[in-house]
Image (cartoon, rainbow, N blue to C red):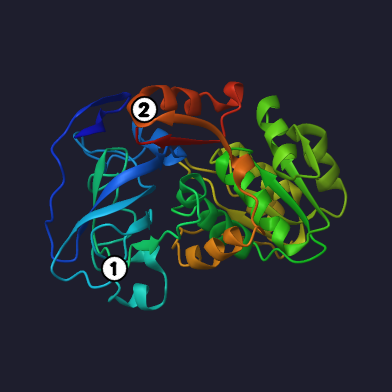
Amino acid sequence: MRALVYHGPAQSSWGTAPDPVIEEATDAVVRVEATTVCGSDLHILRGDLPEVKPGTILGHEAVGEVVEVGGEVHHLRPGDQVIVSSVSACGNCQACRDAMYGQCGGGGGWILGSLINGTQAEFVRVPFADHSTTRRPSGLSLDGAVLLAELLPTAYEVGVRNGHVRPGDTVVVVGAGPVGLATVVVARLYSPRRIIVVDLSGARLENGIRVGADIADSPGKMIADLSEGPGADVVVEASGDPEGFVLCTRAVRTGGHIASIGTHGKPATLHLESLWRKNVTISTGMVDTSSTPWLLELMRSGRLPVTPLITHTFPLDRMTDAYDAFAHGTTTGAAKVVLHRL
């Protein structure tokens, strides 16, 4: 098969790789019909995740068709259309019983495209297939479905839910990349008073308005106005940049919430000298994808408008072009990049 293989920091190639096979009785092999490029993939290529070894196929989001299942897979059969979760869940450990699949202690968690071969390929081996896939309804598009593999659950679980977004809130999203834009879309479900998107890129600010933000601006005056006024009820850090986290601490109101959702590859300073008296709650988290079935039903009913999140599509064999567009999103305006099987 063809796949994107990581060879070390700043080194990858689209080329031939061995077809995946059933290794455990709980595995399935899925033919990839759609996959994506994620910010985490860029962190890997920068060398921020040394646990990812050269030779690993990247990617952790996919939609496709089951082609083979192991003897202990009971809820899937060849021909089923599935959403492959970015998080693998053994289904048996305490974390999985608590629906904290991202913390799976039975060999799962974020392993696709990290500790084992991932989804940026023509086929992928899916561990713990019964617990790590969701059936794709026939009426749900590939583009919509692939956003349920990680992006939308991350925005909801780690951003909106952890941030305790409520009706009437002022919500600030720092960083208008894909997960920041998805946070805008999901936060709208909770009827906030206003959603403000902050970013340095003009192209990304335009995307923020396009997906439903009330205000999109560069950080300077916007953050100053918030810090000098009542502040925001909820601030979502979606940039993964240390300075983005500092902006969040300035924008949040007394008693407010900061939900850190971006992938951080460098240390971020926690200014407790200015925060300790503000009763601020700071949350972090790994996505669990436990919300995928609920979000899927919202999407099917038309209550979750996700089409604006996808800005670029490519055939699977143009993986290098997709990475280039995504990596330069501040100038290309790329938000979510989706690749389709030819």
Q: Is residue 245 visible?
A: no
**Residue 158, percent across and down?**
55, 59
Judge the density around disc 2: few (<14), some (14-19), many (≥20) Cα neighbours within 10 Å: many
| Residue at 74% from the left image edge and 45% from the top image edge | 212
Judged left or right of residue 236, residue 323 is left
| Residue at 41% from the left image edge and 77% from the top image edge | 98
Determine the image quadrant of residue 193: bottom right
Judged left or right of residue 317, residue 123 is left
The kind of secondary structure element at disc 1 is: loop
The kind of secondary structure element at disc 2 is: helix
Q: Tag on residue 20? A: none
| Residue at 33% from the left image edge and 62% from the top image edge | 132
Image quadrant occupied by the N terminus = top left
Residue 196 vertical placement versus 191 (above, below): above
Q: Which amino acid does label 2 sit on?
A: Met
Determine the image quadrant of residue 40: top left
**Residue 232, percent across and down?**
78, 54
Residue 263 vertical placement versus 331 (above, below): below
**Residue 188, percent across and down?**
72, 56
Question: What residue is disc 2 on?
Answer: 319
Q: In this view of the protein, which residue sits in the foreground, 316 or 127?
A: 316
**C-alpha distance separating marks 1 and 2:** 29 Å
Q: What residue type is labelled 1?
A: Asp
**Residue 5, percent across and down?**
24, 32
| Residue at 29% from the left image edge and 49% from the top image edge | 112
Judged left or right of residue 8, residue 321 is right
Residue 180 vertical placement versus 166 (above, below): above
Judged left or right of residue 35, residue 212 is right
Q: Tag on residue 130? A: 1
